[in-house]
Image (tube, grey):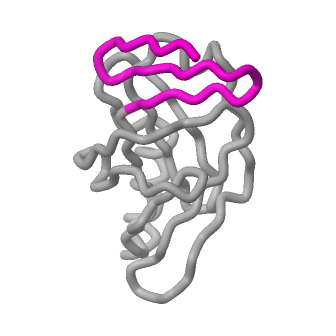
């Protein structure tokens, strides 16, 4: 087994089941409730609209994203599946899960601290207007 360390990023290569350790966070773009306990493949990641960060094991392949809803006991499951490959994670330090009002998600990776994305910010504006 080979270990390569680079800041927060570490890769363990075991063939098809390669894993990476990345700083993880999430952004939730719906004012109707607060998301909590955001999980990537069953492991809790950071939240707080990018303000909280965990170091998480991220595997290649299909990613399952789940989260809780603050004003009920509802557990959300992303309605789409994101697939990560080596190129998505190679040399990256951070992974952000972006959760949209329709329960779809996007995953971004970067070498710099993640930021909210334009689609999400547009969703926040729309849900703000819907609540008025």
Residue 112 appears at what percent x and percent y?
31, 19
- Based on the displayed image, in which of its 4 quarters is residue 47 positioned? bottom left
Relative to 113, say whether 6 is above or below. Answer: above
Q: Residue furthest left?
A: 51
Depth check, front residue: 9 or 88:
9
Where in the figure is residue 61, as x and y percent of width and height? Answer: 73, 34
Is 11 within the magenta? Answer: yes
Q: Would residue 85 be found to the left or right of residue 5 on screen?
A: right
Counting labels gives 0
| Quadrant that contains the C terminus | bottom left
Residue at image position (29%, 16%) is 7
Residue 3 rendering spot, x and y as whole percentages: 47, 15
Q: Residue 76 is drawn in which quadrant?
A: bottom right
Residue 24 lies in quadrant: top left
Quarter of the image containing the N terminus?
A: top right
How far from the left and from the top, in percent, is residue 4? 44, 11
Is 117 drawn above or below residue 111 in the view shown?
Answer: below
Q: Is residue 55 magenta?
A: no
Judge from the rendering whether residue 69 lies leftward or rightward of residue 112; answer left or right: right
Please give the name of the residue rendered at 23% of the width and 46% of the height, measured from the top-left corner.
51
> Which residue is depicted at the point 40% across and 86% down?
71
Above or below residue 28? Residue 36 is: below
**Range of residues picked out in magenta:** 1-22
Side (left or right) of 77 relative to 31: right
């Amino acid at each position: 087994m080979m270990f390569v360390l680079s800041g927060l990023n570490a890769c363990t290569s075991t063939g098809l089941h390669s894993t990476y350790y990345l700083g993880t966070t999430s952004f939730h773009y719906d004012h109707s409730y607060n998301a909590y306990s955001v999980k990537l493949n069953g492991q809790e990641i950071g939240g707080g609209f990018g303000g909280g960060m965990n170091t998480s094991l991220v595997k290649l392949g299909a990613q399952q994203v789940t989260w809780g809803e603050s004003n009920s006991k509802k557990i959300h499951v992303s309605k789409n599946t994101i697939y990560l490959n080596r190129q998505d994670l190679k040399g990256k330090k951070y992974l952000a899960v972006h959760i949209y009002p329709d329960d779809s998600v996007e995953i971004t990776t970067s070498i710099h601290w993640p930021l909210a994305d334009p689609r999400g910010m547009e969703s926040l504006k729309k849900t703000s207007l819907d609540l008025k």
